[in-house]
Amino acid sequence: MVLMLRHLSALSLALELLLLLLCSSGTCAKVKETCKTCKNIVDKFHKGLEDTSKKNFGGGNTAWEEKTLSKYESSEIRLVEIIESLCDSSDFDCNHMVEKHEEYIEKWWFKIQKHHSNLFKWFCIETIEVCCPNGTYGPDCLACLGGSERPCHENGHCKGDGTRSGDGSCSCYDGYTGPFCLECEDGYYNAERNNTHSVCTVCHESCKTCTGPTNKHCQECKNGWSKNAEEACVDVDECAAEVPPCKDNQYCLNSEGSYSCKDCDRSCTACVGEGPDKCRNCSLGYTLEDESCTDVDECNLGEKVCLRENEDCINTPGSYKCACSEGFEDKDGTCVQAIEKTEEAEAKAEETSTKHQESSNIHEDL
C-alpha cells in the first residue's frame, strides 16, 4: 500500500526510474552506504514526525479530531508523507538508502517501534549495520583506544568513532600526545595524572618545556628568554645587545620574548625612539634645535635659492621648491607674464578659428 501511494507522486516515480537506470549501469554497486547518510535520514524522519504532528486539524469537533488524529498518528498516509521528505532530489546516496531499505522503515513503523523506540539504534546500528554505538568503530564495532566509555581518555577523537570505518586510533586534542592521549606535548605539563585521567595545562609563556605553571618551572626557555640566577626564564632585551639588531634608520622596541624594529622619524638618519626629539642625527634639510630635529626653512636663508626672475621659494618638510610667482607661468624654463583671456578675446579667437576651418574646407573642395 505504501509503495502504491508513493507511486502517486511524480517526483518519487521519476526518482525511482533514475535509480533503476543508475543501478542497471552498475552505479548502485559502487555506492558505499555511510553512517552519516543514515543519521541524516533518521534526523529527517524525526523532523517529519514533528511536521506531521496534528497536521490538518484546526479545532472544532474535539471528539472527532481526537479519534481521527489517533488513527493518523500511526497511519500509512503519515508514513508516506514522512518518507517523501527524507531526501533532497539531488541526494543520490540518501535516495538510494531509502529505496533499498524502505521495507525496514515500514517494518519499524507498523510492527516494532513500540519495543524499539530508538530508530537510529535499530535501523542504522542493528539492522543495516552502517553505524556503531558511540565509543566503538569498524565492521565489528570494537572499543576505541581508552575504552568505549571514555575514548582516547576524552583527550582526543577516536578515528571511526560511531561508524563501521576507521582504525580506532586516537587523534589527540591540542596539548596531548601519545597513542592514548595521556602524555603532554611540549609547552604543556601534567596538572593531573593517573592511570585513567590526564589533564595537560599550558606552560608559562617563557617555557618551551616545563613541570609546572610558573617561569621557575621551566625545563627549557623559549627563544627570546633565558634563565636568570634564580633559574627562572626571563625576557632577553635584544635591544640592549652590543650589536643593535635594527638598521641605522630604525629604532628597536623590546617586547616579551621578542623585539621589533620601527622606522625613525623622517627628520632622522638615526634615532633611539619615536619622533623628531629622539633623533641621534638629523636628515638633510633638518637641523638640531632644542634636542629635536626641526625643518630648515631654505627660503629664509641669507642666500637666494630660487634664481629665476619672477619666481618664489616655497618651503616643504626637509626641502623646498621653486615656482613662478602669481600672474606668471613657466614657459621654456622662464617665468613669463601670464596672458589673461577675456571673454571678448576668447570669442575673437573662436571666430578666427571658425573662419580658418571654413577656408580650409573650401580649398579641399577645389
Image: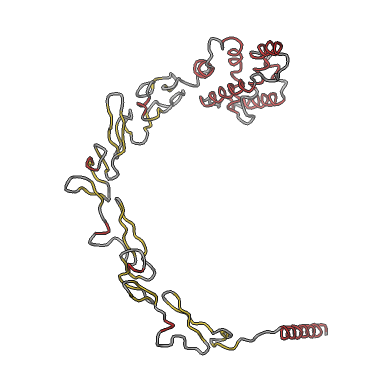
Corner quadrant of residue 209: top left
Name the residue: 35% across, 73% down. Answer: 293
How many discs appear? 0
* Residue 13 appears left or right of 142: right
Q: Examine the rendered structure and indicate whether residue 146 appears above or below residue 281.
A: above
User: Whole-percent x and y of residue 357?
Assistant: 77, 83
Q: Nearer the viewer, residue 293 or 224?
A: 293
- Is residue 21 or residue 253 the one in the foreground? 253
* Residue at x 58% of width, y 21% of height: 46
Q: Measuring from the top left, give residue 318's x and y in whole percent.
A: 41, 75
Q: Is residue 283 left or right of residue 322?
A: left
In what quadrant of the picture does the N terminus appear?
top right
Q: How is the image coloured?
A: secondary structure
The outermost residue toward the left is: 229
Q: What percent of the width, then of the height, locates residue 152?
A: 36, 27
Query: Residue 131 location in percent, x, y?
Result: 48, 21
Is 66 in front, or is 319?
A: 66
**Compared to 116, does 271 lie above or below?**
below
In the figure, is residue 32 to the left or right of 136?
A: right
In this view, which residue lies farthest toward the right? 366
Q: Image height check: is 279 above or below 230?
A: below
Q: Is residue 7 above or below residue 171?
A: above
**Quadrant (top left, top right, bottom left, bottom right) of the C terminus:** bottom right
